Every structure is written in C-alpha cells, then in structure tokens.
Image (spheres, rainbow, N blue to C red):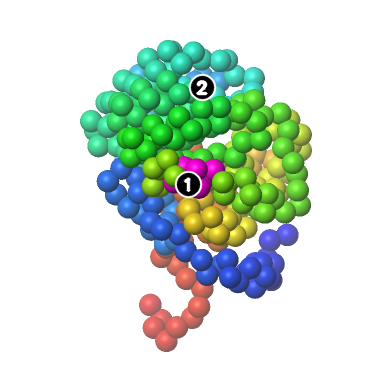
Amino acid sequence: MIDLAALTKLANQYEREMALTVPPLRIGQEAFDTDVSPVIMGVVNLSQDSGYRETIAMTHESAVRKVKTAYAQGATVVDVGAESTLSSAARISSEDQINQLVPVIEESVDAGVAISVETYAMSVTRACLQAGAVVLNMTGADDETAMLELAAEYEATVVMCFESDTAIRDVKQVGLQLDPIAMLADHFGPRIERAHSLGVTDVVVDPGLGFYYRNRDDRVVEARNQARVMFNSFRLRTLGVPLCQNLHHGLVFFEEQVRSGEGFFAVLGRLGGVGMFRTHEVPLIAGVNRAMDALDIEFSEDAS
C-alpha cells in the first residue's frame, strides 16, 4: 500500500540522493530545469501495431495533426516512430520508416514543434536528424557508438533506453530484482560516459518500464514494479542526468477508465523525481504538472 509513512521512510533512507540535482535538459535551443517540473514527451505512432490506439496516425496528415495537437496541449517534445516496440509487431524496413517519418518531421519542425525520433536503426537516425529532429530516442544498441556520434554531430539530445538485448523489441525476459536501482545505475553509467566522450552533451536515461517483457505477464506485478521504480527514480540522479519514464496505463486497476491511468502514475513519478514523462495522454499529464506545481503540503501563516 502507498501511504505517507512509506514515502517518509524512503526519503529518510536515501536522504543523500534526495538532495542531488541534475543539470538543465536541453531540447533544441531551450533548456528545462527538470528538478522543478518534468518535461512532457508526447507520442505519435505511425505504426498501426502500436498498443495505444489513440496515438496511432493512419495517414501523413493525421500524423502532423496529432503532433501539432500534442504540442498545443502541453508537450515539450513529440516522439514519432514508425515501428512498434511490441515483439509481435511487423518489421518495417528502414527505407519505409524514413519515407513515413521524414515528411512528418519536416512539416512538424516547420510548424515550430520539437521532434524526437524513436528508432534503433542507423539510417533512420541519420535521415530524421537531417530532417530536423532534435531528440534521438534510441531503442537499440547494435549501432550505439555510430548513433551517438550522429547525435553529437547534430547536437541532438539522446534518450538512452535500458536494453538487456540489442533492441527493445527483441527483449524476451528481464530480471525482476526486488530493487533494480543498482543494476540500472551499473547499466547506464558506462553508456553515459561513452556518450559524453563522443560529444553528446545532453542524455536522458529510460529504465524501459513501458516495454514488454515475456516474464512480466501478471498485470498487478507489472504495475507494482513500475510504481516502485517511479518512487525510487530520484536515486538514479547519481548518474548526473534526468530520468525519463514511460507512463503505465494501469488497465488492471482503471479498467474502462484506462485513459486516466497515466495521470495516476505521473503523480508517483513527480514524487519520485522523474525528469521526463513519455505519455500518450498529454493534456492529462500537463494538468498533473500544473497541479503538482501549484499545490503544497505545509500550512503557513498566509492562508492564501
């Protein structure tokens, strides 16, 4: 159960980590203090295999409209991808991904929207950064060094996803440690150092909670794991970079109100010090951010 006593115990146990801060996160030409308020990464899926139907774009026009809408609703950056990370999804050739993504990116950038591209393919990375994407959401490690070099060349921010295999969609199982934070720190630490050594100035790490693992079929166990990692996210500030979390929808709890689930998990993430929310429900999460920024806990002499 989540209660104030448990939150207090966690904060006291990791008091040093609670006090850590991370540098401002640059996205394009703007810098954001994610210690104050997380940035929002909206999602637009060009793949019809994607699991969240509301963010699937059936046409080029639909994709651009959804990108602009997410930006208007409060997204700092919008993540576009042309191949679902689900292991059962159809493989899309790099050429087809480029043909779908580049026109959407170009038109969105012309409209003033900061764009992220989700990919594990080197050729897709190059084409999309050339088209104006300012964030690389890197979901594969096969060509990591070359992709990081490209990101440095284009001065792109890199979202570095946890991978226990070469590409996210190829992951079959993942360790279910009671406390995975030390493992995640060991995993990301050397990769962040390599990215910086190659010239990448801005890195965000993503523990990969939004991805599918075959040994995580119990929905309650899955949600409980995500909640725990959300609450403990601040402990990964020892890496010196912000943390991105994909927001869980909580179907097992919210059922027909499933589109409300991401808002609940965003509250947990705010309490845990998450610096970037990747969400399919941008206006909901923007509202959560506004509420968390405006409200407080302690009484004061000023009744207002």
Please say whether residue 73 is one of the residues in the magenta stretch.
no
Q: Residue at x 45, y 24 (%)?
A: 122
Q: What secondary structure predominates along the stretch shown in magenta?
A: helix
Mark identifier at residue 50: none
Q: In this view, does 92 lie above or below 193?
A: above
Residue 204 is marked as 1
Report the amino acid beneath label 2.
Glu
Instruction: Choose the circle earlier in sequence order: 1 or 2.
Output: 2
Q: Where is residue 278 in the image (x, y as percent from the top left)?
A: 49, 42
Q: Which mark is residue 83?
A: 2
| 16 sits left or right of 176 in the view | left
| Number of marks in picture | 2
Question: Which residue sits at x=61%, y=28%?
Answer: 166
Could you say whether the residue bearing mark 1 is in a helix, strand or loop? strand
202 vs 57, nearest the viewer: 202
Q: In this view, does 196 lie above or below 173?
A: below
The correct choice, above or below, for 28 with respect to 55 in the image is below
Kind of residue sitting beneath label 1: Val
Q: Horizontal and vertical percent for residue 9? A: 68, 70
Marks 1 and 2 in Cβ contact (< 8 Å): no
Circle 2 Cα neighbour tier, 10 Å, few/some/many (<14 / 14–19 / ≥20): many
* Residue 106 horizontal side relative to residue 210, left or right: left
Question: Residue 158's spot in the image, x, y percent?
Answer: 44, 40
Crowd band around label 1 with a 10 angstrom C-alpha radius: few (<14), some (14–19), many (20+): many
Q: Residue at x 47, y 71 (%)?
A: 296
Going 45% across and 59% down the picture, which residue do you hit?
22
Q: Give the range drawn in magenta.
A: 191-196
* Residue 162 seen by the camera: yes
**Can residue 46 be seen in this snapshot?**
no
Q: Position of residue 137 (x, y in %)?
A: 46, 35
User: Tag 2's secondary structure?
Assistant: loop
